[in-house]
Amino acid sequence: MPAGRTTLSEYLSQQSAQHLSLHPDLGSLVLEIAKAVQEIALLTSQGALAGVLGSLESQNVQGETQKKLDVLSDEILIQTFRSGNLVAGIASEENDEPLSNPKGGSFLCLFDPLDGSSNIDVNVSVGTIFSILSATPNATLTVGDYLRTGRQQIAAGYAIYGPATMLVFSLGHGTHGFTFDAASGEFILTHPGIQVPADTSEFAINASNERFWEPPVSRYISECKQGKTSVRGRDFNMRWIASMVADVHRILMRGGVFMYPKDTKDPSKPGRLRLMYEANPMTFVVEQAGGLGSTGRQRILDVQPESIHQRIPVILGSKNEVERIEEYHREHDRA
Ligand code: AFP
């Protein structure tokens, strides 16, 4: 390995030596996830050649048509965890109920195996999101064991399958990025100590939902669009990739605010994104990098989960922007 290049496994050994509070098996779990990510990256990179594009007849618990790669990625992760004895229980976007591992383990893992899968067929970046909770070894698992607040995550992160495959995660001591080097087959530390700029001039939202937004969201976006002529005094840019992993990765790299707010489009859904395996892990990573994650009215990591697949409004990214949007919600609710 050329000098000055730290591999994922070297980094994890350094972390467990530096932070004695880390669970001794946490590094091994991250390496297991990295191995599964490599398998998913290979399939994703082959696209049509691997016959993995397109949808299946099946639907997931969300009532969404499953892409072939959704199911294949889910199977890779489940097989990875079940072949080891680190993860006692698994909850996935693609499975109605959590799955227990007969071999037991000290962790629970919740994941979105392929986030942004509607982008797969058009060759746009997608990702895998994971959240790790502690498990009581040898205890009989119930759904309640999974329903812990985001603040109780012991680690969380994502893989992004883009021009480069990257693994970005936090063990609770900052957020760090690793880039996959196909030549060596190693993830290399390329982005140590990521910091989200507190201010930004870039927002990410699906603007086609504008007529369904709550007033504080409409106010914020309208000011951004008015730019220099508004109280903001500067112009803003907009991005929307429709892969949360890709939009949030951009925000970790250069700042911004990602918004999938509560809207009236489907009153039965308090937002599109899922708390346990999208909002919580991505907020953990962003807040470990100095950003913030909010529903607009509550910090995401403080939300007490009620069900595995519950949805939540998400406002995530540059600290000063998220705080401004929260203030707009307070002013609206007071009025
Ligand atoms: P899919 O996995 O169904 O593509 O959904 C992706 C996602 O959950 C999240 O990654 C995106 O930010 C968001 O949905 C995109 O939603 P819209 O399709 O409404 O823009």
Image (cartoon, grey):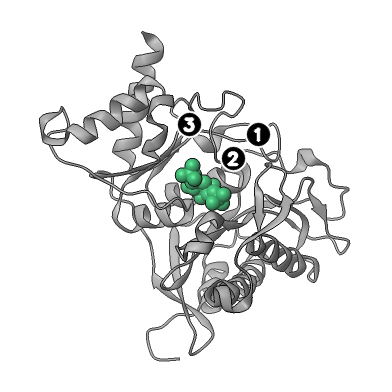
**Whole-percent x, y for residue 196 in the image:** 33, 52
Left or right of residue 170, residue 148 in this image? right
Q: Which labelled disc corresponds to residue 191?
A: none
Residue 281 in view in this figure: no
**Whole-percent x, y for residue 222 in the image:** 25, 29
Pointer 3: what residue? 295
Disc 2 crowd, CA 10 A, few/some/many (<14, 14-19, 20+): many
Pointer 1: what residue? 305
- Contact (CB < 8 A) between labels 1 and 2? yes
**Whole-percent x, y for residue 125 in the image:** 46, 63
Check the image and report above or below for 15 versus 290.
Answer: below
Quadrant for residue 38, please give it. bottom right
Left or right of residue 276, residue 88 in this image? right
Quarter holding the N terminus? Answer: bottom left
Pointer 2: what residue? 275
Helix, strand or loop at disc 2? helix
Q: Nearer the viewer, mark 1 or mark 2?
A: 2
Q: CA distance from mark 3 to mark 1?
A: 13 Å
Helix, strand or loop at disc 1? loop
Left or right of residue 80, residue 312 in this image? left
**Whole-percent x, y for residue 328 in the image:** 33, 22
Helix, strand or loop at disc 3? loop
Q: CA distance from mark 1 to mark 2?
A: 8 Å
User: Which amino acid type is shown beneath numbered disc 2?
Assistant: Leu
Question: Which residue is located at x 35 percent, y 23 percent?
Answer: 216
